[in-house]
Each structure stands twice: as C-alpha cells, then as structure tokens.
Image (spheres, rainbow, N blue to C red):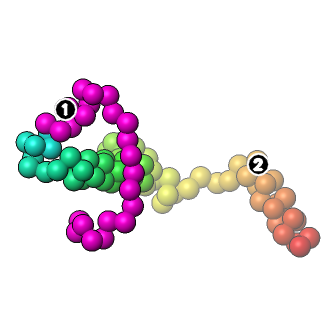
Amino acid sequence: MPVASRTQRTEARLLPEQKSRIERAARIKGLSLSDFIVQNADDAAIRTIQEHETWTLSREDSKVFVNAILNPPEPGPALKAAAKWYKQQMRKR
C-alpha cells in the first residue's frame, strides 16, 4: 500500500514481550514495525471475513443441502398458518 494513501491512524497497547516478538518478526521479513503490523492485521481481517462469509460443508452435508434446495419438503401446518397470517396483514395495509 503506498504511503500517500494512508490517512488513518490507530494505536495498540502491547505487552513488552509481544512488542519484542513483533519487532523481531518484522526484522526477519525486512519490514518496518508499522508495515508488519498493518500487513498482518489486514491479512487476518481478510481471513476472518472470509471465514465468516463462507460455508464449508462436508460431502454428505452438501448432498443434503442440495437435495433440500432441489426437492423442498411440503410446508407444514405452522408455516402455512404463518403465510396465511402474513397475507392477511399485507391486505390490511
């Protein structure tokens, strides 16, 4: 990321051993402390978002899911009653 486009600043409080470890890792990678923290925090953010937004199903679970989509069961009494109630509420508007 070009330095010119960085416009936000944040702070973090670290334990001395955390800071020392992060500084060592940054030196190993040939990065400044700031660049190392930004790069790794951004990578972790991307992974966290992907994990939150992505489903990973086992082979058996994926078969069950696809079957439910392609062959949905008939609505039960509770769902039929809810649909009827909803339609009545919409007519009142």
Q: Is residue 90 above or below residue 85?
A: below
Q: Nearer the viewer, residue 45 or 24?
A: 24
Q: Which mark is residue 56?
A: none
Q: Which residue in the structure is indicated by mark 2?
A: 77
**Number of disc labels:** 2
Q: What x and y, as percent, mark residue 41?
A: 30, 48
The structure residue drawn at horizontal position 81% and vertical position 53%, both measured from the top left corner, is 81
User: Disc 1 on helix, strand or loop?
Assistant: helix
Q: Mark 1 — residue?
A: 21
For residue 27, side relative to residue 48 (left or right):
left
Residue appearing at x 24%, y 66% in the figure? 3
The quadrant of the rendering that contains the C terminus is bottom right
| CA distance for labels 2 and 1 | 60 Å
Q: Residues within 10 Å of mark 1 (few under 14, many from 20)?
A: few
Amino acid type of the residue that numbered disc 1 sits on in the rendered structure: Arg
Q: Is residue 78 above or below residue 7?
A: above
Residue 27 occupies quadrant: top left
Q: Pick the residue in front: 1 or 82.
A: 1
Q: Are marks 2 and 1 in contact (CB under 8 Å)?
A: no
Lateral position of residue 33 relative to residue 49, left or right: left
**Residue 43 shows in the view:** no
Name the residue: 49% across, 58% down. 69
**Residue type highlighted by circle 2:** Pro
Q: What is the crowding at mark 2: few (fewer than 14 residues within 10 Å), some, or many (at least 20)?
A: few
Task: Point out the stretch of residues depicted in magenta.
Answer: 1-24
The quadrant of the rendering that contains the N terminus is bottom left
Percent coordinates x, y for residue 11 in the rendering:
38, 46
Nearer-N-terminus badge (2/1): 1
Along the viewing direction, whichever of 47 and 92 lies nearer the viewer: 47
